[in-house]
Image: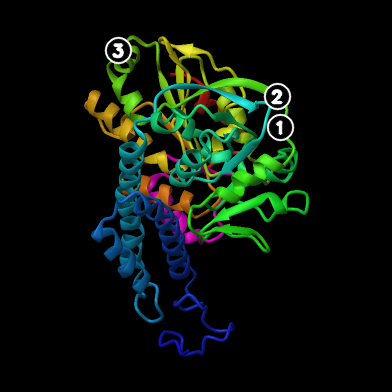
Amino acid sequence: MFCNQCEQTQNGTGCTDVGVCGKDEDMQSLQEILLYGLKGMAAYAHHARRLGKTDENVSAFIEEALFATVTNVNFDLESLLELVIECGRQNIRVMEMLDEGHTERFGKPEPTVIQEGTKAGPGILVTGHDLLDLADLLEQSAGQGVNVYTHGEMMPALSYPELKKYPHFAGHYGGPWQNQQWEFPAFSGPIIGTTNCVLIPSDTYSERLFTTRATAVPNGNRILDNDFSAVIEMAKQLPPLPENIVKESTIGFHHSVIIGLAGKIVDAVKSGEIQRFYLIGGCDGAEAGRNYYTQLAEATPDESVILTLGCGKYRIRDKDYGTVAGLPRFLDMGQCNDAYGAVQVALALSNAFDCGVNELPLEIVLSWFEQKAVAVLLSLFALDVKGIRLGPVPPAFVSPNVFKILQEKFDLKLIEAEPPAELVQLA
C-alpha cells in the first residue's frame, strides 16, 4: 500500500500499518488512542445491546471514527484530537445505556453485606462482567444444590435485587483477574469466564474453565447459546468446596444510593466533617508500582470519602477505613463501566454546591491497564475534568507531544513514586 504523505510503501520501513505516516508519531499516537477508546466503548456497547439498549448515533460515530483511521484519510492533528474527545463523549452515552440496562433488568443496586469465601458443597465460579450470563446461570441452577460465586469484576452483581434474590447466590470468592493463576486451581468447581480479563488456563483447571461467546481460550469449553447445563452437571460431579468464609464486606453504593444521600453529604461538607473526596480505582494490572494506590488510600485523611470502582478496588479494599459523618468512608460503586455513576455523583455534587466539577474538593487517581480504561479516561476529558492522576506508567501509545497536549488541556498528571503530601493533607 502506498502512502501519499511520505511516498513510501507500507512495508514496515516507511509507513505503519495503522493508516498514518510512520514519520508522524503524534498522528499515529492519536489514532491508537482513538482505536483503543473505540475498543473499550464497543465492549460496553456489546453488553448494553445484549440488554436491549442501543443508540444509532453511537453506531454511526463508531463507523465514522474507524473510517478516520483508514490510510490517507486524516493527516490533521486537531481534527483527530476532536474525534478522540468525541469518543469519550459517546462512551458516556454507552455507559448510560448499560447502567439503564442493568437497573431495568436487575433493579438498582443497594448496600449489601456479602460473604467472601466458600460454603460447603458444590459450587460454580463466575468471573468477568456480563450480568446477563450470570442471571441465566442463576435461573438454570436454581434448586440444583449448587452454589454460585462471583470473582473479580462480577462482585457488584451481589448487590442487584433481582440477582441476590436467589438463595444459592452464595457470595464472592477471590480477588482481581490477575489472581486467577492461583485462585482458580484452588477452587474445585467449574469456572465461567464471561468477558475479557480471563487468562489462558494452566492444566490444573483448564478442563473446568468455560467461556461464553467471543471470550475464548485455546482448547477451552465455549458456550455459545447460554445453556449452562454442562457446567451445572460438572459442578455436581466435582469435589465439593469446603466451608471457608473468610470475611464479610459491604458493596452496592450505586450512584443512585450516593445521590440519594446528597443532602447529608452536602451538610457534612459545609460543616467541615467531610473535606475531601477521592476517586481511586480503574483497570488494574500486575506489574510493579501499583502499590501506590494502596498507599494513597491508607494515607487519606479521616475527614474524607473514598469512591472506588473497577478491579482497581482490590488494591485498596482490604482495610477498614471507618466512617465519616455517619457514612462509610469507603464506598464501592461497582464495575469499571460504573464510572458513569462516579460522573453522575460528581455532577450532582457540583450542582448542589453551584460550582464546576473542577472546583469540587475531588481527587481522581486512576490505574489504567486496557482499552476500557482508555474509554473511561476519554469520557472524563469530554466532561472537561482536569487534574486527573494516571499511572503507574504512562501509556506507551501516547507520544510525548500528545501527552503534553493532554497536560495543557486537562492538567493530566502521572502518579508520583509515592503519594505527595499535598494529595493527602487537608487545607
Asked if residue 116 shows in the view, the reply is yes
- Comparing 273 with 152, the one in front is 152
Q: Secondary structure at mark 2?
A: strand
Q: Which residues are magenta?
A: 384-411
Q: Residues within 10 Å of mark 3 (few under 14, many from 20)?
A: few
Residue pointed to by mark 1 = 241
- Comparing 12 with 247, the one in front is 247
Disc nearer the start of the sequence (2/3): 2
Q: Nearer the viewer, mark 2 or mark 1?
A: 1
Q: Does residue 44 appear to the left or right of 147 in the view shown? A: left
Query: Mark 2 is on which residue type?
Result: Asn
Query: Mark 3 is on which residue type?
Result: Asp
Residue 267 circle label: 3
Query: Mark 1 is on which residue type?
Result: Leu
Residue 234: percent from left, percent from top: 66, 46
Marks 2 & 1, CB-CB < 8 Å contact: yes
